[in-house]
Structures are given as C-alpha cells and as structure tokens.
Amino acid sequence: MQKKGEGLMLLFGAILFVQGFGSAVTDSGWGVSFGVAALLREAGMPRWGDLVIGGTGCVFLALGAWRRLAARRDPVESRSNT
C-alpha cells in the first residue's frame, strides 16, 4: 500500500520540475518566465535559481520513484512500516 507522502512527493517534484526548467526554457527562448519562478525572479532571485528549482524537482521525483520501487520490491516490509 502506498503512503500518502510518496504520492505527494512525486506531485511536488513534478510541479517543481515544470516550474523551474519550464521557466528557464521560456526565459531563454522568448524572454518571458512564468509561475513561481517568475515571481521569485521579480523578488530578486538570480537567473540560475530556475535551474535550482528544477533540480530540486528532479531530486523529489527520484526520491519518490525510489521509495515506490522499494515498496514494490519488498511488500512485506512496507506493510510492517505502516
């Protein structure tokens, strides 16, 4: 059984991934940033901050996927931890 936190980690990772890397790509291609990254940039965040946000999203996606695969590999142990 999947814990609630695992699904939220994957969702939050996907949001950060799209917000960070998407804003960096649109800013370099069209000169416009969007979303949370655009708000942070207006508040004074440097341009490389978009990549940090996207990289953080990658880390959350990797951790969520790793936890989900670990739970599938050993279902007996994942049941005992709930």
Image: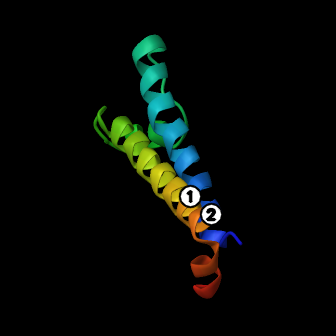
Label 2 to label 1, Cα distance in Å? 5 Å
Amino acid of disc 2: Arg
- Name the one closer to the observer, 53 or 31: 53
Q: How many numbered marks does the figure carry?
A: 2
Image position of 80 with respect to 1: above or below: below
In the image, is 58 to the left or to the right of 67? left
On the image, which quarter does residue 71 sit in? bottom right
| Residue underneath mark 2 | 72
Quadrant position of the N terminus in the picture: bottom right
Residue 28 found in image quarter: top left
Horizontal relation, residue 77 to residue 25: left or right:
right
Helix, strand, or loop for circle 1? helix
The C terminus: image quadrant: bottom right
Residue closer to the observer: 15 or 81: 81
Pick the residue in front: 75 or 58.
75
Q: Position of residue 55 (x, y in %)?
A: 38, 42
In the figure, is residue 76 to the left or right of 56?
right
Label 1 CA crowd tier, 10 Å (few <14, some 14–19, many 20+): few
Q: Amino acid at mark 1?
A: Leu
- Picture residue at 50% right of the left edge, 46% below the top: 16
What residue is drawn where x is 44% and y is 45%? 58
Q: Secondary structure at mark 2?
A: helix
* Residue 7 image offset from top left, x and y in percent: 64, 61
Q: Which residue is mark 1?
A: 69
Instruction: Look at the picture and state if 80 lies above or below 53.
Output: below
The residue sitting at 59% across, 65% down in the picture is: 6
Tell whether label 1 touches label 2 (CB within 8 Å).
yes
User: What is the x, y in percent for residue 60?
Assistant: 47, 54
